Image: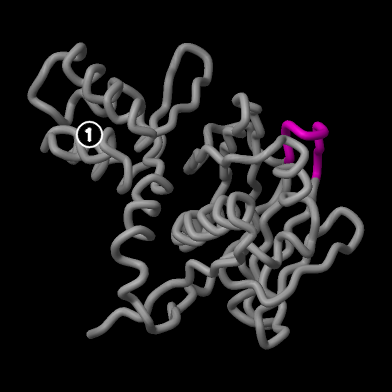
Amino acid sequence: MDSIFKALADPARRKLLDSLRDRPGQSLHDLQGQLDMTRFGVMKHLGVLEGAKLIVTHKKGRFKYHYLNALPLREVIDRWIEPLLEQPAARAVLSLKSQLEGPPKMTKPDFMMQTYIHCTQDALWHALTDPEANAEFNFVAGSCERDGDALVFRTPDDALMLICTETKLTPKTRIESTFEPHWAGPDVALGKSRFVYLIEPQGENCLLTLEHYDIPIGQEGVADGWTRTLAGLKTWLETGNAIKFSYQTEEA
């Protein structure tokens, strides 16, 4: 945690994080133009942020794209702030007019997240593919059932919330799935996107990377949900406790 506070102490690094929050997936060239310093200086700041796990990168060809990784910040919030918040979540969901069509595009991710989890590779694979496990760590789901290749999530009052259909599995290392939200109600069509889980064993731990692609306009807020879901996954696997990191009501 010391590396997080050290990384956040510099205003230039905070500016880089703000920029990646507003526009994920920027290259070094994109970021360099936002700071009054040399390319090498920006690279040094990005190295500090990457060392603190506050950003993750995705390499495509000769370009390297940078993404804000909110999970370490979530751990700081969970330690000091979350216990002070008592009221449950309530957020409006945007209605969408268009739906993603055609085959998946091989683009860079819209956002990425990474976290280390103290568990075995088998345990993490089971948690990500088992419906009962998903119901335990998903930040808002009341239940989850498997329907063939699909994991079907429902809210605590049994309304259909989300369908994630596995499209390609590489056992214990990679899961590719579609992401089909239904939380706006049965009469509202929301666009479909896709995500990838990557599992890398790291001694007694596993490094889990999430990549989310092709997010329709209006659904950028799914990153907040992923932050809470992956925080719940880490807590559940490391402690056995199911904790719902729900949204908090915002006061006017």
**Image quadrant in which you'd find residue 37:** top left
Majority SS type along the magenta span: strand
In the image, what residue type sits under mark 1? Ala
- Residue furthest left in the image: 36
| Residue at x 82%, y 33% (from the top left corner) | 171
| Total count of labels | 1
Horizontal relation, residue 71 to residue 203: left or right: left
**Where does residue 247 sit, x and y in percent of width and height?**
43, 72
Query: Callout 1: 10 Å neighbours few (<14), some, many (20+)?
Result: many
Between 179 and 84, the one lying in front of the other is: 84
In the image, the segment drawn in magenta is 167-175
Q: Which part of the image, by quadrant, shows the N terminus? A: top left
Colouring scheme, one of rainbow, by chain, secondary structure, one colour: one colour
The residue positioned 61% from the left and 75% from the top of the image is 183
- The residue identified by callout 1 is 7
* Displayed quadrant of residue 52: top left
Is 126 located above or below residue 109 in the figure? below
* Image location (x, y in percent) of residue 211: 57, 40
Q: Is residue 73 left or right of residue 133?
A: left
Magenta includes 230?
no
